[in-house]
Image (tube, rainbow, N blue to C red):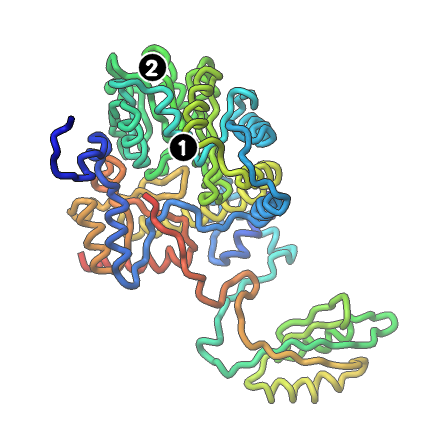
Amino acid sequence: MKTAKEFHPIDFVNRQVRDIPPSGIRRFFDIAATMEDVISLGVGEPDFVTPWHIRSEAVKSLEKGRTYYTANAGLLELRREIAKYMEKTIHVSYHPEDEIVVTVGASEALDAALRALVEPGDEVLIPEPSFVCYKPCTVLAGGVPVPIETRAEDGFKLTPELLKSAITEKSKILVLPYPNNPTGGIMTEEDLSQIVPIIKENNLMVISDEIYSELTYTGKHVSIATFDGMRDRTVVINGFSKAFAMTGWRLGFACAHPDVLSAILKIHQYGIMSAPTFSQYAAIEALKHGRADVERMKEEYNIRRKFLVDSLNEMGMTCFNPYGAFYVFTSNKKFGMTSEDFCQSLLEEQRLAVVPGTAFGDSGEGFVRISYAYSQDNIKKALKRLEAFAKNH
Amino acid sequence: MEFTRKILNLLERNATYCAKDISELLGEDEIKVAKEIARLRDEGVILGTKTLINWDKISPELTVATIELKVTPQKGEGFDKIAREIYAFPEVRSVTLMSGGYDLAVTVVGNSMKDVAMFVGEKLSTLDTVVSTATHFVLKNYKVDGVLYVEEPKDERVITL
């Protein structure tokens, strides 16, 4: 019999989970939410509403009573459309039957992929600055996250030198988050060709998070899976959130070799059953007829991107010209403060909220992330406040 | 054609874009863009540039009306002659030939409802070939020519991470 002692729910919480630090972004914006008249450029989702024809398909599916579970891996029709989409965009063929799974957002695909591949002690290489989920999900999967600090002078790319210096005997997975949140950096065909041999030599598996693939402003997005011998080594993750403005629909997908995909599917099956049915019907419509919408939104982001970069440069806030996603990672070094202090002061003095670069990894120090998933009007208003701050410092 | 259309779409959005701006946005050569803009101007595709003003904020008494005109088209001239006579008036901001229940949609700007009504009564209705007029006054502008005149709806997005 256990000795009776005081009951504290916290004692029951998995220690690993307890040790995961709270999100830097969350904490900061919780403070901003308590203040009046704050302009925030911190959001990480499109300001566009999902195009009507896509919403309409979801409504129709509900009207038709399609409210049951779908196949665990997702509607076959959707997986077929996804296969066509991958063929068209990254020129890689995947079998809808056993190489594609439809997930609850690219987030679930990422989490399931890590859990499917990582064993206790495996090292997962994570270029930083990058999306805040990779580290915690790696830890929760029992792995060891190994950050790789990318640099502004390299365009925040993963260079062969940086990759080589991070690899150890325990390295198993490389997360490749490009186009990148928060830096807007991309990996061109040339850049990828330089790391492919290193990945093969060291027998790594790649999880390629390509959620911003449609938002590439110069040239076309290239996936590492297109390289010779890389298709079976890569789990390609993508989704509908950013390109089709379907963040709230929670729909994404993973494509991988059948042996890996079936493991991801197992986790997905037991944890989730299947992704939302009406979201899947909407996604079929998005892939079949949503091309023009994607182009329209991308053109809009591009206009804002240029406007923001030009304005920041005029203010003397040097900014790495982002080639993808919808963020500008601008340097706050000229103010002689840490990113956190800068964001804090900016919020207090000018009621403008942007995200400190350190929320995305230690190598984000000296930078702040400004999102341009906002109308030009909003961006203009925000820039006025930033200008006012710059004048006072 | 795609190239031309893209340039025009950008200029329509923002008339202050120069050839350099457009070349950066489209990833095209600056000289090529400049030449195309010059050509479009010469050919009357680009008609001019204007500044969009929200007059409600400066002169709330300014009154805009849309008048539906029914006219008798003239032999040999169709609607062109009457349209010419109407658009010659400085008070007339636009004249458009329409399909449906009336012929010409005319936008008139005046200093008051009475002003506009007097203009319609004295100057438009009295024109030869005008059969009838129906005047509608603009009460509030929400979106005009692609530009929002009102505050954008509140941003409901939350920070999820």
| Disc with the residue nearer the chain's start (2 vs 1) | 1
Residue A32 x, y percent position in the rendering: 26, 55
Residue A117 is at least partly visible in this image:
yes
Write the residue at 26% across / 58% down: A34
What residue is shown with label 1? Answer: A108
Q: Residue furthest right?
A: B75
Q: Quadrant of residue A151?
A: top left
Which amino acid type is shown beneath numbered disc 2?
A: Ile
Residue B136 percent coordinates (x, y):
64, 78
Please name the amino acid that badge 1 sits on.
Glu
* Above-or-below relation of B38 to A165: below
Q: Which secondary structure, mark 1?
A: helix
Please tell me how crowded label 1 is: few (under 14), some (14-19), or many (20+) other residues with Cα within 10 Å.
many
- The answer to whether B135 is drawn above or below residue B40 in the figure is below
Residues tagged 2 and 1 counted as in contact (Cβ below 8 A): no
Q: Is residue A312 rendered to the left or right of residue A53?
A: left
Q: Is residue B49 toward the left or the right of residue A170 in the image? A: right
Q: Chain of mark 1?
A: A
Q: CA distance from mark 2 to mark 1?
A: 28 Å
Residue visible at 45% across and 35% down?
A104
Q: In terms of secondary structure, where does tag 2 sit? A: helix
Q: In which quadrant will I find the N terminus of chain B?
A: top right
Which residue is nearer to you in this view: B111 or A55? A55
x and y, in percent, of residue A320 in the image? 32, 40
**Mark 2 lies on residue:** A198
Figure quadrant of the C terminus of chain B: top left
